[in-house]
Amino acid sequence: MTSQNSGNRKSRLPEAPATRPAESLKQDILRHVLYSLGRDTERPDRQTVFRALALSLRDRLVEKWIASQRDIYSRSSKRVYYLSLEFLPGPFLRENLIALGLENEAREALTDMGFGLDDVADEEYEPGLGNGGLGRLASCYLDSMATLRLPAYGYGIHYAYGIFYQLIKEGRQVERADNWLRGGTHWEFERSHYVHPVRFYGQVREWVDEQGRLRHSLENATTVMAMACDMFIPGHKNDYVLNMRLWAAKTSREFEFSFFNTGDYIGAVEEKIRDENISMVLYPNDEAPEGKELRLKQQFFLVSATIQDIVRRFRKKGIAWDQLPRKNVIHLNETHPAVAIPELMRILVDEELLTWEEAWYICVRTFAYTNHTVLPEALEVWPEDLFRRLLPRHLQIIHEINRRFLHDVRRQFPNDPNILGRVSLVHEGESRWVRMSHLAIVGSFSVNGVSAHHSEILKESVFHDFYKIFPERFNNKTNGITPRRWLRQCNPTLAWLITEHIGPEWLTDLAQLKKLEPYVNSEGFHRAWMEVRLRNKHKLAEYIRDKNGITVMPESLFDVHVKRFHEYKRQLLNVLHVIALYNRIRSSPGSVTVPRTYIFGGKAAPGYYMAKHIIRLINSVAYTINTDPRVGDLLKVVFLQNYCVTLAERIIPATDLSEQISTAGMEASGTGNMKFALNGAITIGTHDGANIEIMEHVGNENLFLFGLLSHEVNEMRSQGYNPRLFYERDSELREVLDMIAGGFFSPSEPHLFRDVVESLLNHGDRYMVLADFRSYVYRQQDAANAFMDQAAWARMSMLNTSRMGFFSSDRAVDEYAKDIWGVSGV
Ligand code: GPV
């Protein structure tokens, strides 16, 4: 104790020693309030306290990160590079507190300062650097890589604007810029001294060097600099921290003083700004690439900067290039970063002067590729002309890869000349296109799908020719989600109840949830389980009242459909059923006995007309139903605007019924389905993606599957699907469609939704909404009946949670590490 303290003994209680974690955290917060944020420590506002707390945690994270990097380096471990154009980390504060084991300390420190942790956490604005499932998967995987102590790095782009902020105005989606950096950055380190040049455009010069070798170099290229920004991803209470390195574009142009003379000073500055546009905005298109030049630039920008980083680290080892695959694996999250394959070839051949054969041998042992979709419009292709203009040398390399590949295929399948056109890396028709998935498959040693069902479809249809050529490359890695964020963090009371009964091991070994099963017959556990769930529903009901001004009954069945808007995800099928229920309530009061609250949420790509139109339809239907006095509490429809990770964390723990109703064969996996079931919601879904494996794990009696199987979808299509037959035969369906087409939900604009109905009746109903309508209605009735027996529902709910262990991203990442990457924890 210091003499000062002893001197004050009379007037004050002795101060706790500064080594107490809560006290030292408080001191750090105050220090950051003053010295990092320049604010008065006497009365900081909540935002300031949030930022100071974040900076205090960053201090702790960076120490552990340095130590972790030293470990990786000293063990000379094989490294995993996870390349993704999208990451969707969600808010970091609670997540980092849990991982660092500082939750209680933070609560105490903040209380001391007169703040509540929940209020302070609400100050955080999440980085929306992804569109949906694909980006969120990348973030779950980083969390698991850190928890498993893998020597891994996430690499992406530091978009200045993430996915747009969605407003609903008069029922319509309105997009607003997502200026996530406006409050400053508190989680990351900008490394302004640490940049790589990225070169685009220009011309390829061919020349012969003194040794008589044919050489290639790029002349007159435009150079943009990539600056590293690092964010930290801690493992769960293991002192291990990984980084997600996001590249921001910086101009390389120096101010040219000649401009002063010609007077075009502003013109010079404009050019500088144009360079920095590369990392300005995330393309908001999900599974339907926009095909713009700037997007291809973004892809190459990420790839070029990242490969330079990888090569720089590898060079430090001073070992031969053929050791590259033994020390590194580069994982391609979708084809978006697939230009990494020709880029590595270019470095090895043009700069390091390896032979083509040596370089190709290295490449094909270094890359692995995950496919996330079978939708034909989502398979990425680029016009060959655009490629040639932006990346002339890379196009040459792709042509050479293709020439050699087709040569081999011709030898392997001498009797099938058509296969060459089908597998070529360049589609040759009226116009020529570079097929990125073909490039990714040919250049990788591993190709995986994201659920058992999806991986079979890849082998049997989409990539069947490639499966015949490279059968050993194809494998499955069913997606997973991190239980730290998607149970412990978003649903702390349920997590606490679970830990109370089976201990905390489930947090890093989700299969432990099995130990809950004996409790499903305990009345006390039942009651506690349902109380927690009801409390969560109360909280969501409050949020809905605040945001939408709609009062919903927490006791009603919360039926939730949140995800990106896409026709194949069939939010339309859901709303058709909502209207059918509404009609039943109106025509025979008493026929609907289970009150329901329908909750919708999700963004549509700004240029996706039908998806936006369906959002508008849902909002119109919601307005009609919510204001119809005959409906009362039996039915409420809510559209929550700006669905994002933060909002998902509020909704999922309060959900009874989880809508996973894609057209069979179209949803590669789904990961929302896993988050809901883990939190005790029951799934109503189709035989698609990971729904099938969820059924296998939780048991067919504990979820509601319905509808056509994917082979039935294919058969029905090939036999000539006629949606009109369903319309004619099903009077309830007919009434619903006639109401929409006739303007029932848009009285001031009677034709408003006619084209929605036309897409079903006159344009082929590509997503088989009408074919699945009747079985969906029946299954919804089963769900309502089940909900009436609350004890039986509670049992189903608990069994869902207890049997979801398989769907941990720890399991998924462990499979990647063992089967694909060949790495283990440090
Ligand atoms: I390709 N996915 C996505 O979110 N965006 C994309 O551009 C593409 C795929 C999704 C799939 O739709 C989901 O089924 C899957 O669960 C998710 O990727 C993660 O694998």
Image (cartoon, rainbow, N blue to C red):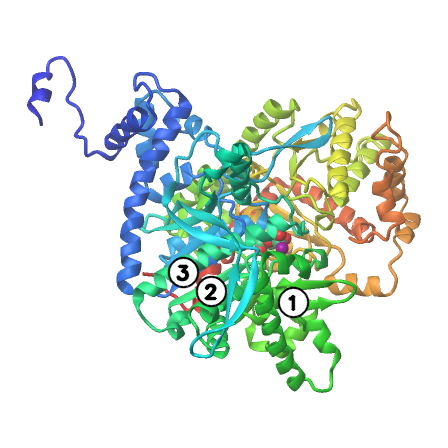
- Real-space CA distance between mark 3 and mark 1, rounded to the nearest whole angstrom: 30 Å
Q: Position of residue 275 (x, y in %)?
A: 53, 44
Q: Which residue is mark 2?
A: 815
| Eye-nearest disc, 3 or 1 | 3
Q: Mark 1 belongs to which amino acid?
A: Leu
| Mark with earlier residue (3, 1) | 3
Question: Which numbered disc covers residue 755?
Answer: none
Q: Which residue is mark 3?
A: 310
> Which residue appears farthest toward the top when viewing the image?
11
Side of 548 where 137 appears, left or right: left
Side of 297 where 90 appears, left or right: left
Badge 2 crowding class, 10 Å Cα cut-off, few under 14, some 14 to 19, many 20 or more, is some
Residue closer to the observer: 148 or 589: 148
Q: Position of residue 803 (x, y in %)?
A: 52, 55
Labels 3 and 1 touching (C-beta < 8 A): no
Q: Position of residue 788 (x, y in %)?
A: 67, 39
- Real-space CA distance between mark 2 and mark 1, rounded to the nearest whole angstrom: 19 Å
Q: Which residue is mark 1?
A: 458
| Residue depicted at 73% across the width and 49% down the height | 779
Badge 1 crowding class, 10 Å Cα cut-off, few under 14, some 14 to 19, many 20 or more, is many
Q: Secondary structure at mark 1?
A: helix
Badge 3 crowding class, 10 Å Cα cut-off, few under 14, some 14 to 19, many 20 or more, is some
Q: Is residue 631 above or below residue 139?
A: above
Q: Position of residue 631 (x, y in %)?
A: 77, 27
Find residue 371 and report its image quarter.
Answer: bottom right
- Image quadrant in which the C terminus is located: bottom left
Labels 2 and 3 touching (C-beta < 8 A): no
| Mark with earlier residue (2, 3) | 3
